[in-house]
């Protein structure tokens, strides 16, 4: 719903260049199954699913809307839900309407969300069917993300589909949208969005009118849960304030709303051996502790001196803590992790003054996974130890933050100085994963071998020593602990298709100290049923391929003593089309 006048201009312009012949079709039955719906068959709104949002919000719900939302402008009857806007003085506003959400009751991630809607058309009206990120309360807008499935304004014969996300470099909202003409929006149409981790497709009556690639890391907001919203605003920044007073009462009707999930393709279950791994995500992190001082907005200042390794931390020489908790920040970004696992997070922190600090573990968009205040006493080491559990479906980044500015309840005075030392940092878990050295052609894991691993082998009870590594038999199965370091992340410098045959030449950016490289390639963009080849050279040619688009990624590996192969992280995927 949140729009600017510039957004409106851009969206309207996008229609001018569009051909109103649809490029694709979406069908509910195609590899989708229904997971939730509200058919509105009762005689009242189901409050186990829906919440009423009441009032005018902050600055007219962020849009300077001219209505007051109530819970009495909604009715359910004859199989539809009706939002009726009225011309009446209420709560210092001249109009009333309704807005409902599934927030904290029904959240969705990926699939298809669609509704059958008919709506009024007159100057000043703004009906909408849209979604906000479920983490809205913790990170705010636009960091939570917003997917506008359908919006319409005034008396236009257009509907709009838009994505809003957080533009990190500009610290503000970024948006992208398109619109399409509909024959008569006062009649029923099905409006929907098909949503994956990589792509959004907006459609009307099954006809796709806009596809947006969101595979880039900057679209992390898309890869989270969202809740559904219906509302009908009157006036505001986008539709303007020229409101047709003769059009009231005006009703938006929703016949049904439905959510589908994609039926996953059947995959062969991994049946190979498992290994127990212990990883300290801080120890394996190649980065150093960073810092931020908000001098312009928080009055904070100082310097940071990170050590050579993330585990040994950094020292923050804060000359002014400013007036805001996040005015002074210390952070470590891009930790490797396993979703669904519980990590032991520990560190030692010492301050030369009494000081409150906020400890935060964050995912994409700075979403808080864990957060807690700690109170440091002057010159007394604070030994922190907590367990942090990551979500099973967690994707994207994992970062550690400390808010060292002026916190609520802080013993330190605004703009005072502090010298804080961080050391002995650990974020560790022990878990089981499929053995990366086992290959039956069906393993679906791409997880790398980790810095500390326990491998199970069979030696018929014989005790052996190889290259300084001792394994002791216990009647057939033995366990050895091998401590190794992972190679750095690799990248594909260039992928070139041959002009005269169906070959692809791959040029890999060299990584020092590695044994070789693994190349995985497939005609499936998720690399299902991929083939893997190994090379010790940074150049490799894949021969006699099909006339299709290929998706390629690489990773480095190193063979350590005891013939232990340790792999690094996969590179970003490159694609190339074989034409001949």
Image: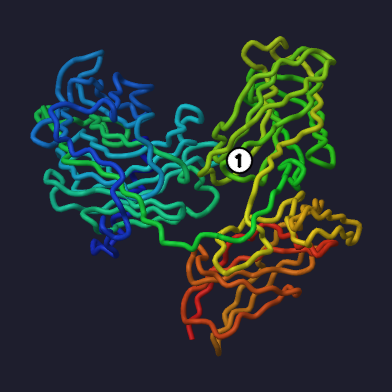
The residue nearer to you, when weighing 394 against 196, is 394
Name the colouring of the figure.
rainbow
Q: Compared with residue 539, is residue 331 higher up or lower down, i.e. above or below?
A: above
Residue 118 located left or right of residue 579 = left
| Coordinates of residue 53 in the picture (x, y in percent) | 30, 23
The answer to whether 313 is drawn above or below residue 545 in the figure is: above
Dot 1: few (<14), some (14–19), or many (≥20) neighbours within 10 Å? some
How many numbered discs? 1
User: Is any part of residue 413 visible from this angle?
Assistant: yes
Hey, which residue is sitting farthest right in the picture? 468
Mark 1 lies on residue: 341
**Which residue is at the far bottom?**
500
Q: Is residue 315 above or below residue 459?
A: above
* Residue 295 shows in the view: no
Q: Secondary structure at mark 1?
A: loop
Q: Quadrant of residue 108?
A: top left
Q: Is residue 493 left or right of residue 578?
A: right
> Where 55 sits versus 268, above or below?
above
Where does the image place residue 88, in percent across and percent down from the top left? 15, 18
Query: Residue at position x 60%, y 44% from top?
Result: 397
Residue at point 79% right, 26% down?
348
| Quadrant of residue 412 within the rendered picture | top right
Position of residue 129 measured from the top left corner of the image (x, y, whole percent):
27, 39
Most foreground residue, 336 or 478: 478
Q: Position of residue 579 (x, y in %)?
A: 48, 82
At horizontal 70% and vertical 55% (from top left) the residue drawn is 449
Q: Residue at x 29, y 55 (%)?
A: 15
Q: Could you tell whether 306 is left or right of 193 in the image?
A: right
Location of the N terminus (image quadrant): top left
Query: In the picture provided, is 378 more to the left or to the right than 369?
Result: right
The residue lying toward the viewer, choosing from 486 and 63, is 486
């Amino acid at each position: 719903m949140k729009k600017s006048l510039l957004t409106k201009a851009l969206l309207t312009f996008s229609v001018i260049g569009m051909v109103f012949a649809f490029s694709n079709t979406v069908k509910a039955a195609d590899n989708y199954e229904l997971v939730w719906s509200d058919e509105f068959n009762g005689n009242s709104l189901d409050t186990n699913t829906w919440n009423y949002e009441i009032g005018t919000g902050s600055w007219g719900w962020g849009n300077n809307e001219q209505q007051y939302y109530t819970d009495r402008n909604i009715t359910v009857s004859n199989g539809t839900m009706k939002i009726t806007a009225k011309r009446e003085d209420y709560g210092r506003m001249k109009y009333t309407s309704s807005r409902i959400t599934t927030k904290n009751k029904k959240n969705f991630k990926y699939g298809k969300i669609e509704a059958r809607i008919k709506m009024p058309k007159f100057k000043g009206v703004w009906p909408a069917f849209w979604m906000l990120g479920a983490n809205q309360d913790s990170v705010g807008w636009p960091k939570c993300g917003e997917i506008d499935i359908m919006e319409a304004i005034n008396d236009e014969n257009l509907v709009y589909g838009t994505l809003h996300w957080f533009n990190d470099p500009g610290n503000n909202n970024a948006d992208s949208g398109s619109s399409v003409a509909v024959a008569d929006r006062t009649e029923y149409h099905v409006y929907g969005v098909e949503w994956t981790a990589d792509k959004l497709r907006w459609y009307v009556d099954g006809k796709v009118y806009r596809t947006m690639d969101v595979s880039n890391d900057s679209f992390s907001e898309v890869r989270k849960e969202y809740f559904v919203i219906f509302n009908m605003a009157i006036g505001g920044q986008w539709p303007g304030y020229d409101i047709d007073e003769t059009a009231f009462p005006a009703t938006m009707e929703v016949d049904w709303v439905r959510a589908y999930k994609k039926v996953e393709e059947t995959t062969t279950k991994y049946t190979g051996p498992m290994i127990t791994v212990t990883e300290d995500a801080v120890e394996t992190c190649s980065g150093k502790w960073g810092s931020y001082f908000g001098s312009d907005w928080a009055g904070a200042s100082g310097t940071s001196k990170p050590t050579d390794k993330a585990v040994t931390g950094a020292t923050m020489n804060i000359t002014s803590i400013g007036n805001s908790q996040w005015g002074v920040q210390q952070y470590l970004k891009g930790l490797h992790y396993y979703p669904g696992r519980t990590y032991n997070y520990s560190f030692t922190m010492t301050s030369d003054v009494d000081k409150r600090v906020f400890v935060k573990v964050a995912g994409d968009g700075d979403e808080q996974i864990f957060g807690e205040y700690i109170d440091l006493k002057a010159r007394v080491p604070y030994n922190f130890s907590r367990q942090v559990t990551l979500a099973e479906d967690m994707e994207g980044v994992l970062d550690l933050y400390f808010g060292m500015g002026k916190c609520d309840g802080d013993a330190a005075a605004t703009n005072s100085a502090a010298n804080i030392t961080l050391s002995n940092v650990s974020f560790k878990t022990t878990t089981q994963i499929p053995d990366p050295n086992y290959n039956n052609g069906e393993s679906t894991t791409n997880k790398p071998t980790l810095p500390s691993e326990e491998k199970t082998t069979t030696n018929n009870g014989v005790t052996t020593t190889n290259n300084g590594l001792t394994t002791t038999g216990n009647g057939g199965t033995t366990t050895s602990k091998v401590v190794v370091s992972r190679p750095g992340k690799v990248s594909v410098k260039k992928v070139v298709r041959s002009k005269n045959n169906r070959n692809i030449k791959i040029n890999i950016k060299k990584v020092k100290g590695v044994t070789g490289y693994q190349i995985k390639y497939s005609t499936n963009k998720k690399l299902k049923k991929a083939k893997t080849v190994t090379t010790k050279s940074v150049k490799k040619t894949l021969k006699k391929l099909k006339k299709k688009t290929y998706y390629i990624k690489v990773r480095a590996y190193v063979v350590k003593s005891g013939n232990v192969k340790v792999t690094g992280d996969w590179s970003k995927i490159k694609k190339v089309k074989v034409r001949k």
